[in-house]
Image: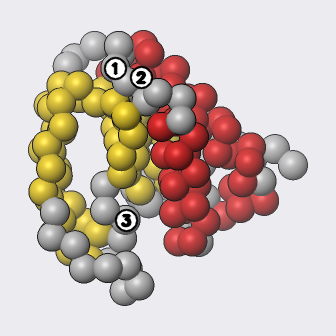
Amino acid sequence: MRLLMIYANKFGYKTTLKTVESVPEIDEEKKIEDVLVGFIHAEEDDEKNLKYIETKLIKHLKWAARKNDTKKILLHSFAHLSDSKASLDFTKKVMDNAEERMTNSDYEVSQTPFGYFLDLDLQAPGEPLARLFKQIDVKL
């Protein structure tokens, strides 16, 4: 898994292009302040150990949120960080499970619409921990 985390003072998105036929039609525009955005790229090997990948993803997101003094986390499927890609079903399951687990841990978690390209509006501070990248290698 590849995980790019950006803390944003303000983050906005609007659905533009549906890329996955099986997802519902969504016309959505949102703006969020004081949020950690996780750009998540699940890779093919990640499918070998869902529990491990999910747990590591959550730990990294919570750590980065704490370092940026926020309880808001936005999960965004971003399949542009590697040539290897997990299945759509696996990726969505990881994101749904992570959202549920972090919400149960008193974080305010949401997701961008899955299966869409989005117009993004990002305002992020120029601070060392506002932009972080992690590569999570699967353990068998």
Query: Is residue 11 toward the left or the right of residue 52 in the image?
Result: left
The three-letter amino acid code for the residue at tag 2 is: Ala
Residue 124 location (% of width, % of height): 20, 26
How many residues crowd around disc 3 within 10 Å: few (fewer than 14), some, or many (20 or more)?
A: many
45 is higher (above) or lower (below) than 7: below
Q: Residues within 10 Å of mark 1 (few under 14, many from 20)?
A: some
Which mark, residue 70?
1
Q: Which residue is mark 3?
A: 114
- Under circle 3, the secondary element is loop
Pick whichever, 56 or 4, lies toward us: 56
- Identified at 36% across, 46% down, the residue is 110
Relative horizontal placement of residue 8, taking residue 64 as reference (left or right): left
**114 over 17 or under it: above or below:** above
Q: CA distance from mark 2 to mark 1?
A: 5 Å
Q: Earlier in the sequence, mark 3 or mark 1?
A: 1
Structural distance between the alpha carbons of marks 3 and 1: 23 Å
| Residues under numbered marks 2 and 1 in contact, where contact means CB atoms less than 8 Å apart | yes
Asked if residue 61 can be seen in this view, the reply is yes
Mark number displayed over residue 65: 2
Q: Which is nearer the N-term, disc 3 or disc 2?
A: 2
Instruction: Please name the amino acid that badge 1 sits on.
Output: Thr
Q: Earlier in the sequence, mark 2 or mark 1?
A: 2
How many discs appear? 3
Tell me which residue sits at (15%, 50%) in the image.
30
In which quarter of the view is residue 14 placed? bottom left
Residue lying at the far right of the rendered structure: 140
